[in-house]
Image (cartoon, rainbow, N blue to C red):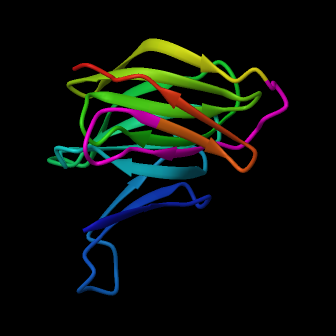
Amino acid sequence: MFASASSDRNVCIWDARQSKPTHRITNKVGNFFVSWSPCDEYLIFLDKDNRVNTVDVRNYKVVNTHDMKVFSHEVIFHPLSNHVFVAESGGRVEVLKFVGGALEPATVIQHIHIKLTAWLFRFPKTDKNLLLEHPMHRVQYGTLMN
């Protein structure tokens, strides 16, 4: 199973053995960046209205919407903790705590170069550290606890 988000307002769940989506979630606006939760019971996606939407894949319904304050352009679950990372404009990453489908603000990471607009999230498989990378910068964010 995999998911796709597109500007046609749909988030689709696919089975690689089929040529059509198995489920389709239609949003009011276009969507981009989708990420599965480590437990595989939820997925999150960003939409063009700058919201992070949580879908419960057990019933394929949006169960929570979290409004972001600034333009956001990537979202990902941490594979070993209950945190979601949202890359924002201005070199900022907002860390959200994920609790039963709801997203709560946890902390913000601000790069000292505010013109930085691109982040790459990497999570080493051996621990809960987050590495934030940019072609010219590398920042390690400390260990995250559940």
Q: Position of residue 109 (x, y in %)?
A: 58, 20
What type of secondary structure mainly makes up the magenta span?
loop
Give residue 139's quadrant in the image.
Answer: top right
Q: Position of residue 30 (x, y in %)?
A: 60, 51
Q: In this rendering, is residue 36 above or below 22? A: above
Q: In this rendering, is residue 33 above or below 90? A: below
Please name whichever residue, 116 or 127, is drawn nearer the observer in this view of the structure: 127
Residue 135 relative to residue 139: left or right? right
Which corner quadrant holds the N terminus?
Answer: bottom left
Name the residue located 48 percent from the left edge and 58 percent from the top edge: 10
> Does the segment drawn in magenta span residue 145?
no
Name the residue located 59 percent from the left edge and 23 percent from the top edge: 68
Please name whichever residue, 136 or 110, is drawn nearer the observer in this view of the structure: 136
Residue 28 relative to residue 36: left or right? right
Name the residue located 25 percent from the left edge and 49 percent from the top edge: 60
Q: Position of residue 75 (x, y in %)?
A: 50, 41
Please name whichever residue, 46 or 145, is drawn nearer the observer in this view of the structure: 145
> Does the segment drawn in magenta span residue 118?
yes
Give the residues drawn in magenta, as a range.
113-130
Q: Position of residue 5 (x, y in %)?
A: 49, 58
Residue 133 relative to residue 97: left or right? right
